[in-house]
Amino acid sequence: MNAKHPTALDNAQLNAEPYWMPFTGNRAFKANPAMRTLVSAKGAYYQTAEGQTLFDCLSGLWCSALGHGDPRIAQALKEQAETLDYSTAFQLANPQTLRLAERIAGLAPQGLDHVFFCNSGSESVDTALKMAIGYHRLRGEATRTRLIGRERGYHGVGMGGISVGGMVANRKMFAPLMLNGVDHLPHTYNLSQMAFSRGQPKWGAHLADELERLVALHDASTIAAVIVEPMAGSTGVLVPPEGYLQRLRELCTKHGILLIFDEVICGFGRVGEWFGAQRFGVTPDMITFAKCITNGVVPMGGVIVRDEIYNTFMTGPAHAVEFMHGYTYSGHPLAAAVGNVVLDIIEQDGLLQRARALEPVLEDAIHSLKGESGVIDIRNIGLAAAIDLAPIEGSPGLRAYKLFEAGIEEGFLFRVTGDTVAMGPPFIATESEIGAMVDGLRRCVKKVMA
């Protein structure tokens, strides 16, 4: 372990008890909070309260792709706070938000030209689902109320998002609150057919045809939208099979069903293009986004919609509200100012190109773990990768949790879900840092398999 930083804190100085932590084993954390309390960050590294330096293996939580502490972002935030710190988005706008909407629409696939802002990925998903239902109703197809998600999908923690989501642990406690009329496509992961795939698996395009079965079961006239992640990140970097998204697009078009891509993780460079839609060559009707648009510095999310959807809502008196939805912090000027400078940095520093250049580096490094005891699968796409560990019998998730703690001791902050270890390093990472990350992961795997 590194020597303690001068600002290091110990457990006696950290009262963690009042804090109810999200998606966390609270009791385990509070047994030693200093080990996992982050006090500063710069570039691709965090500093813990114990003084340990940690390489940020997942860009915060898939959001800090530009690294931490970029002075250009801090300056933009300061200047905007001094100029216009808040303005409501109801009946009013501000220049930063207008400019950001224009830029995002310009980067999105052709025809997706309108942007609605909110504050998180969860909110962006629930917003998109409401848009889908409203769109069909305004077109005279009010029977189209059914929503189709996918098993193992993660679409945030709003009631709409967990309803269309397919991660059982997120759903089971809240079953009485979930939306009616929701069904799910099967997930696309099959270990026997896809183990140790590099990039998109060759097998699995036919799984999109399950939508035909759901259409036959429910009738297309009842289905409003299908929502999927182009690459499912939160469930462990599940990469779409070749041809799968194309087939899903064909079927949605055939049956008049809207196709929504949840790009909260994929958007703004994670798969080497502005959006996964462009990387995989499929244009949906809506794209949800969040995370990287502000590099995680200020919360922001949104939905990019096809012109026809927007125009369908633009009816009635010009002074009337067309879409009864929004948030106090929609299009927040501080978030928009940061979003604009983030886009500037990505463009000026060539970070999309850098992400694509680092993709084969990460791919070769992570697949070098094939053959390590306990590693049962490896997957990658863009600047994202994951490995699956053989679970401890009777204790699913425990092996990966032990690896998470071993990683902190080694100087690496890995992300674990179940017995999967996910990685999405910052775009500013170097080849040597990616190599060191995978070497550290190898040591951690050996420790937890010993």
Image (spheres, rainbow, N blue to C red):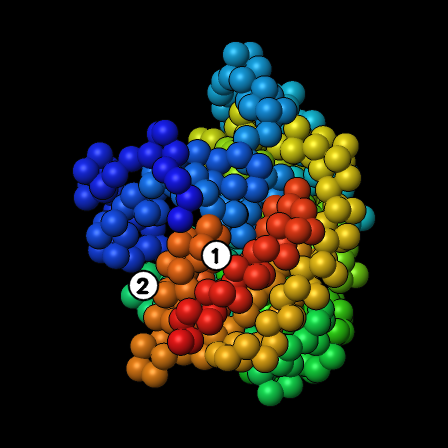
Image coords of residue 289 (percent x, y): 60, 47
Residue 174's disc is 2
54 to the left or right of 14: right
Residue 414's disc is 1
Image coords of residue 107 (percent x, y): 76, 42
| Residue lying farthest to the front in this orientation | 3
31 to the left or right of 194: left
102 to the left or right of 11: right
Q: Earlier in the sequence, mark 1 or mark 2?
A: 2
Image coords of residue 95 (percent x, y): 65, 20
Query: Badge 1: how crowded within 10 Å, few (<14), some, or many (20+)?
Result: many
Image coords of residue 122 (percent x, y): 47, 50
Query: Which-is-in-front pick, marks 1 and 2?
Result: 1
> Quick one: SS at disc 2?
helix
Residue 243 location, quadrant: bottom right
> Quick one: SS at disc 1?
loop
| Residue lying farthest to the bottom in this orientation | 192
Q: Quadrant of the C terminus?
A: bottom left
